[in-house]
């Protein structure tokens, strides 16, 4: 059986971490749904920047916009909304079949707003209204400023994909914001069954950052015993961190507070594993799929990772395995002089910066297209 389809039996949904016009116009997205059981799709500024720069998919829109004096930001927004609406329309069959439990396409608020709660709220509301589909999610970064926005938008009945999560502490804050938002929405008479959310935990970036820190520690000089321990942590920390985050999910979504909301029709905020392509060639190319399989989760994979897992992925419920080992990995990391708090805080800042850089490159690419004669 197709390993991608097997994941569904273990409670995990497959989403694709990619979107460009040809996915909609050439049947690529529909094929993934039909053959691989795809349940959703994510986009971000980096994905759109690659789509605009690397294809002719948007020539019709650019041709119509040339000479009109429109800004690159305005034209980008038009193409992004069009693509996400098109993806949502194709995924609507999944959404309807699963009674609103999946079948979502996501569009991100501008990364320039990541540290501005009010501006994030305004843009999220505007994008939600423009998208005008029940099976879309607006992506809001899980920054300090993003957390109150997540609560407020949930309280207004919007579907939110919380992105750029790295730390367990921030993830716990996000679950609290979701529950509080649902409670407020219910108090206002809202239908909780209409609200969906995912919390996107970034995985591979953690190993990249931690392995770099470990290398610096080793180069600075350590004892033979410390060297042995630190070297044994290579490629293990991201999975350990994710497993412990999933324990938080289990705690929060089995609590009396959650059960009261569930009784009113609320859906759990699923954990979504993002950044799941393996960056280190020494590691198995489907490592971050195989080791993070469990109920009520999503794994959003780039196309190459989807192909790899279809070809040679192995499926079992790995998220629930060896929690003691995950705790020991994190303990050894701290004992070895690497602060997970510092790593995740830096990754959150870098994540926003990288998306800002992609957004700027995207606008430049759109501007270049608009200037063509």
Image: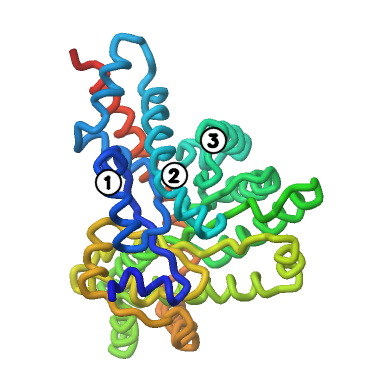
Mark 2 vs mark 1: in front: 1
- Asked if the residue under mark 2 is in contact with the one under mark 3, i.e. CB atoms within 8 Å, the reply is no
User: Is any part of residue 337 visible from this angle?
Assistant: no
Q: Is residue 188 above or below residue 52?
A: below
Q: Which residue is mark 3?
A: 132
Residue 234: x percent and y percent? Answer: 30, 77
Badge 2 marks a residue whose secondary structure is helix
In-front residue for pair 309/97:
97
Residue 372: x percent and y percent? Answer: 20, 17
Q: Which residue is mark 1?
A: 27
Q: CA distance from mark 2 to mark 1?
A: 14 Å
Identify the residue at horizontal 62%, vertical 48% (top origin).
150
Q: Which is nearer the N-term, disc 2 or disc 1?
A: 1
Quadrant placement of the N terminus: bottom left
Residue 307, numbered label: none
Identify the residue at horizontal 75%, vertical 55% (top origin).
183
Task: Report crowding for label 2: few under 14, some 14 to 19, many 20 or more residues within 10 A (C-alpha).
Answer: many
All told, the count of numbered labels is 3
Q: CA distance from mark 3 to mark 2?
A: 10 Å
Q: Is residue 223 above or below residue 245?
A: below
Q: Is residue 318 left or right of residue 54?
A: right
Q: Which residue is mark 2?
A: 88
Mark 1 vs mark 3: in front: 1
Q: Which is nearer the N-term, disc 1 or disc 3?
A: 1
Model colouring:
rainbow
Quadrant placement of the C terminus: top left
Identify the residue at horizontal 76%, vertical 50% (top origin).
184
Q: CA distance from mark 1 to mark 3?
A: 22 Å
């Amino acid at each position: 059986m197709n390993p991608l389809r097997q994941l569904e039996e273990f409670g995990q949904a497959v989403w694709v971490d990619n979107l460009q016009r040809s996915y909609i116009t050439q049947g690529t997205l529909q094929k993934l749904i039909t053959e691989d059981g795809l349940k959703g799709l994510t986009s971000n500024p980096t994905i759109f920047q690659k789509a605009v720069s690397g294809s002719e998919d948007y020539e019709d829109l650019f041709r119509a916009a040339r000479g009109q004096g429109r800004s690159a930001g305005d034209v980008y927004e038009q193409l992004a909304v069009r693509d996400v609406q098109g993806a949502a329309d194709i995924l609507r069959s999944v959404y309807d079949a699963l009674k609103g439990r999946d079948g979502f396409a996501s569009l991100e608020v501008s990364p320039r707003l990541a540290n501005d709660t009010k501006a994030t709220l305004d843009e999220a509301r505007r994008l939600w209204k423009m998208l005008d589909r029940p099976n879309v999610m607006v992506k809001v970064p899980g920054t300090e400023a993003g957390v109150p926005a997540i609560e407020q938008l949930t309280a207004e009945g919007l579907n939110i994909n919380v992105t750029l999560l790295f730390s367990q502490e921030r993830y716990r804050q996000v679950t609290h914001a979701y529950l509080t938002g649902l409670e407020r929405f219910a108090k206002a008479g809202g239908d909780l069954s209409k609200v969906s959310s995912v919390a996107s935990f970034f995985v591979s970036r953690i190993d990249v950052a931690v392995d770099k820190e470990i290398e610096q520690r080793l180069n600075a000089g350590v004892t033979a015993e410390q060297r042995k321990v630190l070297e044994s942590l290579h490629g293990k920390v991201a999975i350990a961190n994710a497993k412990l985050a999933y324990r938080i999910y289990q705690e929060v979504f089995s609590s009396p507070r959650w059960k009261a909301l569930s009784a009113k029709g609320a859906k759990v905020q699923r954990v979504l594993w993002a950044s799941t392509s393996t960056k280190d060639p020494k590691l198995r190319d489907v490592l971050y799929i195989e080791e993070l399989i469990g109920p009520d989760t999503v794994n959003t994979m780039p196309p190459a990772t989807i192909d790899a897992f279809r070809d040679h992925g192995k499926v079992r419920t790995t998220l629930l395995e060896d929690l003691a080992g995950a705790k020991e990995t994190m303990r050894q990391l701290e004992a070895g002089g690497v602060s997970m708090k510092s790593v995740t805080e830096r990754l959150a800042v870098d994540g926003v910066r990288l998306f800002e850089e992609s957004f700027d490159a995207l606008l430049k690419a759109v501007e270049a297209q608009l200037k063509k004669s």
